[in-house]
Image (tube, rainbow, N blue to C red):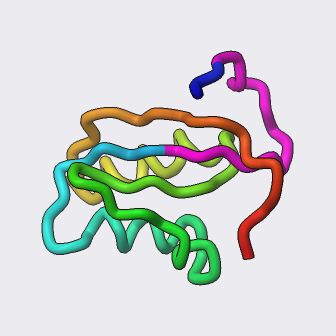
Amino acid sequence: MMHSGTPRDYSDDMYKVYFEVGEWEGRALTVLTECVGEAQARHIKHLEFGYELVMPIQCVPDVAKLLSQKNIAIYQIVRGAKIERTLS
């Protein structure tokens, strides 16, 4: 289920986010792991064309910028539902 209206969400709320990327040799996964930390990285799901992870919504532009700086193509970013609990 997708919702809109979060550009001003600077809370610690966590959301599912899908990054569809042009992956090569795990470079995107490395960037995502660095962004969320080792503990949260255990919960990153590798899907056919990208990765689904849980993160604060305000981090999404920074992650997109880092992927772009590493010359990793981003084909779409999809924000999913807010997560009611944090993963540990």
The kind of secondary structure the magenta stretch mainly shows is loop
Of all residues shown, which one is farthest toward the left? 24
Q: Position of residue 5 (x, y in %)?
A: 70, 17
Residue at 64% from the left image edge and 18% from the top image edge:
4
Q: Is residue 73 left or right of residue 78?
A: left
Q: Is residue 31 left or right of residue 7?
A: left
Does the image show residue 55?
yes
- Residue 13 in magenta stretch: yes
Highlighted magenta segment, given as a residue range: 4-17
The quarter of the image holding the C terminus is bottom right
Does the image show residue 69?
no
Residue at 61% from the left image edge and 73% from the top image edge:
40
Q: Position of residue 30 (x, y in %)?
A: 37, 73
Of residue 57 and residue 45, the one placed in the foreground of this image is 45
Q: Position of residue 1 (x, y in %)?
A: 58, 27
Q: Is residue 11 left or right of residue 74?
A: right
Q: Is residue 40 above or below residue 82?
A: below
Toward which corner of the image does residue 6 lie, by quadrant?
top right
Residue at 30% from the left image edge and 52% from the top image edge:
50
Q: Is residue 34 above or below residue 68?
A: below
Of all residues shown, which one is farthest toward the right? 11
